[in-house]
Image (cartoon, helix red, strand yellow):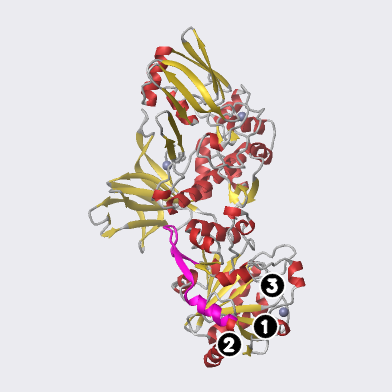
Amino acid sequence: MMNTLNTFFEAQMREWALARGNYEALDSVWSRELVSEKLPTALCVQCNLARLVSTGASIDKASIAARPCFLCAGNRPAEQQSLALNGEFEWLVNPYPILPNHYTIASVAHRRQNIAEAYDAMMQAVLALPEEYIVFYNGPKCGASAPDHLHLQAGVGEGIPLVEYAKGQTSEECLQAIAPFGYQTYLIHGAEDRSRFDELYSMLPVPEGEYEPRINVVACRKGNRVCLIVIPRHAHRPHCYSAEGEAQYLISPGALDMCGLIITPRREDYERLTAARALDILCEVGVRIEPTIDVGIMQGKEVAFTLNGEYTVGHNKRQGTFAASMTDEGILFETGVYDTLYVEPAQDSATFSLHGVTIGKEFHWQQQEMQTFQGSLILRIIDGELHAINRIAIEDYLTSVIASEMSGTSSVELLKAHAIISRSWLLAQLERDERLKMKDKSSSEEGNSQLSNADSQFVKWYDREAHTHFDVCADDHCQRYQGVNRKVTPQVLEAIRTTRGTVLSYGGKVCDARFSKCCGGKTELYESCWDDTPHPYLSVVEDPFCNTHDERVLSEVLNHYDQSTDFYRWTVEYSQEELSELVRRRGGFDYGDIIDLIPIERGPSGRIVRLQIVGAKATRIIGKELEIRRTLSENHLYSSAFEVKKKNGRFILHGAGWGHGVGLCQIGAAMMGAQGYSCEEILHHYYPEAVLAEWYK
Ligand SMILES: [Zn+2]
Ligand SMILES: [Zn+2]
Ligand SMILES: [Zn+2]
């Protein structure tokens, strides 16, 4: 067969100038790797100008019905020949190739795309082709540009990330569920036995109004066995495909893109695509799985731990108490030395305990205790210290964090709203950290804290700094996390379970859902507190709910709540001497005696963004809100929403609210929950532009 096929291909190259030109261009096509620490294998992006025809194809029903079918014999270009290799299908040279020797294997009859009717032809083709070839299928809503005409494609698949990865797997199972890129992927080993595919196919959901599950299928050969990659799809095209301006990427993923070979016909997209953005796009059209998160728990020269169940360490099963220590060669555990030591549970229910975890760091009550965790333990040397990292499923992590943050007596609707915003915030942080890591550090204009530091102005903001070797730490810097949480109540479990995978989303992306204690009557804009990037879903809303003294509700939201505290409206008073000394010490700048505090710029909630401090020796503007709050108070002022009154040489600040005021107002949300509002109503009140989306199953 290969001789016939090669002769056919060469003849088409001689006779068909358009195809020849595109194959010649393929030899010098730009491609580059997209590397990320989190991926088992790099992605690859190809800039393929000729693909504009297919990537840009209109695939709506009307457009398809209106055009002559380009796979039907009567409508093909005059130069395009076909080769009949079996009765039902004929081979055509694809004139817009992604792969070397790229064929379309089209049904002779015009009938709709349907894997069940092409499966046997797919197996025949892949078994007859040399091992470097692949045969693949794009479902009607999964990248096929001719969904109305049954066809497969074939070509040389060397170097396609997921194909190489699949060929390297040595599983003894016939069906293997993997997710190397964060979306569901199945490998079927021995797929020439069709029943293995049929079983999986029958389990996948068929969307309403459609006739088959949304899938991409790629077949490759290992000896005389077929390894099949099956990728379920959620959506046909990502949001960025139809976005405008900067946000647009012309990427319309098919089987090859889903296998990590991303095709774009536009040079600007090719140049700016990062691994993080590419994964974002692929995950949006694939079926996301629940992510895991790496939490940095502790560090030292030695880590002692107890495995309270069976764990796998290297190739060995272990249970009991152990210690690992740092040596010049690496991590010493038992008699082996490791760069990174993975300790993974052999049963789902297994937990491990870390000895001597420091809690309350830098507080007067700092102490050490033993803490117990679910998931895996990873030991890694970072900057000369041995770190213990807990890799845990995100839902389990959220359960623990929400149980510490919230009171067990809160309404379930409030807990559900909190679960959704915590999940959204966390996923947005992971996405943001990944994006920042990908960026050339020197050109990063989106820092964690920045200043415009002219003599007359000191404007700085503080955002969470990204960690480099794990996702979040276990301290308040990220979110306090103490492992398996003894405070988990049935209400918290229910709130997590019923909102599983649900996030706030805007424009196809998960929202960075900020929240603070009390807005003071109106919420604030993101730009008033952090960098100048507008976040349309963090809009300004009037909040009638947080003006309350309801102690039961306040105690739901405020840990260690001091009943005398009043923060909806508050007053702080300083003498001139007190204020001058305080500002010099806290702000690290000598203004001399302070004469005046003049708000220069306020956000919509009344929070001061820039404040002029007029002193006897110097005058300067400071900002943004957190810098103002820390400069004008021994700890932090409740908020930067205040007015300044001067009376008898004293400064009196009349203020409103507690915290930055952006996004959800926790006191207001708790009041809404207590008054019977649903989780959806609470979220819609504070994030009117955002929608709820199921991010993963
Ligand atoms: Zn047709
Ligand atoms: Zn942290
Ligand atoms: Zn409020």
What amino acid is found at the position of numbered circle 2 in the picture?
Answer: Gln
Contact flag, marks 3 and 1 (Cβ < 8 Å): no
Marks 2 and 3, Cα distance to the nearest angstrom? Answer: 25 Å
- Which residue is located at x 66 percent, y 32 percent? 672
State which region is magenta.
18-45
Residue 435, relative to residue 42: is it above or below? above
Residue 215, relative to residue 299: is it above or below? below
Q: Which residue is mark 3?
A: 147
Percent across and percent down for residue 635 are: 43, 25
Residue 182, relative to residue 602: is it above or below? below
Would residue 634 be found to the left or right of residue 675 on screen?
left
Residue 263 shows up from this direction: yes
Q: Which mark is residue 199?
A: none
Q: Which residue is mark 1?
A: 77
Q: Which residue is mark 2?
A: 12
Which tag is nearer the camera, tag 2 or tag 3? 2
Nearest the viewer among 1 and 443 is 443
Percent across and percent down for residue 255 are: 57, 70
Please tell me which of labels 1 and 2 falls first in the chain: 2
Residue 136, relative to residue 650: is it above or below? below
What amino acid is found at the position of numbered circle 1 in the picture?
Answer: Pro
Nearest the viewer among 693 and 149 is 149
Please tell me which of labels 2 and 3 falls first in the chain: 2
| Mark 3: C-beta under 8 Å from nearest atom of ligand 1 | no
Would residue 8 be found to the left or right of residue 435 on screen?
right
- Which residue is located at x 70 percent, y 63 percent? 207
Q: Is residue 287 magenta?
A: no
Percent across and percent down for residue 156 are: 50, 79
